[in-house]
Image: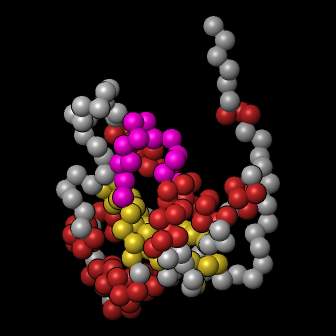
Amino acid sequence: MTAVLTRRSEHHLVDPAPNDEEFAYLLRAAATAPDHGRLRPWRWVLVRDEGRVALGRCFADECAGPESRRGQMEAKAQRAPLLATLVFSPVPNDTGRGSPIPEWEQLAATSAMAGSLILLLHARGFGSVWRTGRFTESERIRRVLGLHWEERLLGWLYIGTPERLTPSKRRATEDVTDRISVFAP
């Protein structure tokens, strides 16, 4: 409950970020999120150091306009020490593993895993912010990151240590009973 109520999107992230081993450790736990058929229809591409520079160049190359705008786009990849790229890799329905699992359900499983990972990162003291936008549709960025034709780039989880000095306050919960109905035949 504490992780859920204190997590915030962190926009100012600095070193350290989880190293590859710690990311894998947290991902093993996040991968226990609901996933019908345990298909794991996702993969992560971790972008650090020189990879962020190369990705930033791709962002700039995708941007039309003045040089200052290109520089802003290039700088986006430097906003966190780790850009964890989430790739949706749907498993075709002809897997022979029992009843077919529709793509929408595989996308829901991917989202559940990502949400769990965000909470695990927060519980470990790391901050993150989810970034999407038009770059997720870029063919050039897809090629640079090694996506296959059937995969979809869902965005980047920018990860690092929150730069702010004060801890997050607990969010106040809101009344959501108007979003609940009870079936009574």
Residue 31 colored in magenta in the image: yes
Disc tally is: 0
Q: Position of residue 40 (x, y in %)?
A: 38, 48
Q: Residue at x 54, y 59 (%)?
A: 117
Residue 64 colored in magenta in the image: no
Q: Is residue 22 left or right of residue 102?
A: right
Above or below 183: residue 40: below
In which quarter of the view is residue 99 placed? top left
Q: Residue at x 57, y 83 (%)?
A: 16
Q: Is residue 27 left or right of residue 176?
A: left
Q: How is the image coloured?
A: secondary structure
**Where are the magenta residues, as a range?**
30-43
Q: Which sits in the foreground, 140 or 68? A: 140
Residue 79 visible: yes
Residue 60 visible: no
Above or below 113: residue 56: below
Above or below 88: residue 58: below
Q: Position of residue 90 (x, y in %)?
A: 30, 46
Q: Quadrant of the C terminus?
A: top right
The single residue placed furthest to the top in the displayed view is 185
Q: Residue at x 67, y 72 (%)?
A: 125
Q: Is residue 111 left or right of residue 171?
A: left
Q: Position of residue 77 (x, y in %)?
A: 42, 81
Q: Residue at x 22, y 52 (%)?
A: 150
Q: Is residue 5 left or right of residue 56?
A: right
Q: Which sits in the foreground, 28 or 75? A: 28
Q: Position of residue 55 (x, y in %)?
A: 33, 80
Q: Which sits in the foreground, 133 or 57? A: 57
